[in-house]
Image: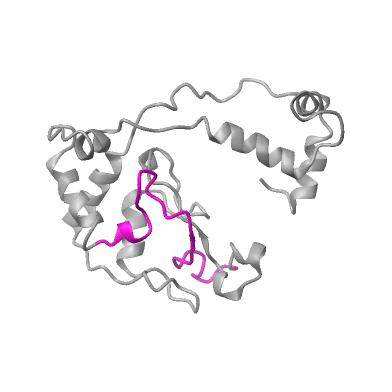
Amino acid sequence: HGFANHDELVAKISTFAGYKKLFAKVFGAGNITKEQVGKAIASFQRTLISGNSPFDRFDYDGDEKAISESAKRGKKLFFDKARCNLCHFGTNFSDEKFHNIGIGWGGEAVDPGRYNVTKDVKELGAFKTPTLREISRTAPYMHDGGFATLEQVIEHYNKGGVKNPFLDNQIIELNLTKSEVADLVAMLRSLEGEGWQHVKAPTEFPQ
């Protein structure tokens, strides 16, 4: 968000009378707090629901025509050779845990990630596993936005990430071929679903 800490963010929001009025309406009179900001953002995020994707119709409903043959091959790779399912599983395709996958260790300053919260050195450079639903629509990828395409993301994993002292032991070289990478991308694209399209960017903000 471009602020040095949560206090700066709250202070900025508090300068807008429109936001103060909205927060008071929901949370009651008093100063805006970072906890309230977190709850407000979380309430919005819970409206971003994705389901009934082609993959869902294939995997749960047994509709063989819902996804392409390439995506079907990609599914097999996802749960086997490519090892994606070690961190991306369940209906949300996430273990909800934090991992160092070798992003941000290529010479630039390292983002501490989860370490900023826990102060556990083993979590230096670790970030939460995101959902893969709608992944084809949410470029750029990784916490630093370093990859523009899904192909680049898969190639990162294919090479075993960027070696560093805290790299998750699940990250290894995969030896995927170009056609296998293409199949994985097809599978990931099949996770484009329904249920979120009602959300539109606001045309104006509280002042």
* Relative to 56, 5 lies left or right: right
Residue lying at 80% horizontally and 49% vertically, measured from the top left: 7
> Does residue 108 lie above or below 76 as drawn?
below
List x then y, in percent, for residue 30.
Answer: 87, 33
* Relative to 44, 16 lies left or right: right
* Relative to 50, 83 lies left or right: left
Q: Which quadrant of the structure image shows residue 45?
A: top right
Residue lying at 38% horizontally and 43% vertically, measured from the top left: 135
Q: Is residue 112 visible?
A: no
List x then y, in percent, for residue 128.
Answer: 50, 56
Residue lying at 31% horizontally and 58% vertically, measured from the top left: 84
Report the quarter where the N terminus lies. Answer: top right
Specify the segment rendered in magenta. Answer: 82-109
List x then y, in percent, for residue 141.
Answer: 44, 50
Residue lying at 48% horizontally and 76% vertically, measured from the top left: 164
Residue 39 in magenta stretch = no
* Relative to 25, 145 lies left or right: left
Q: Which quadrant of the structure image shows residue 188?
A: top left
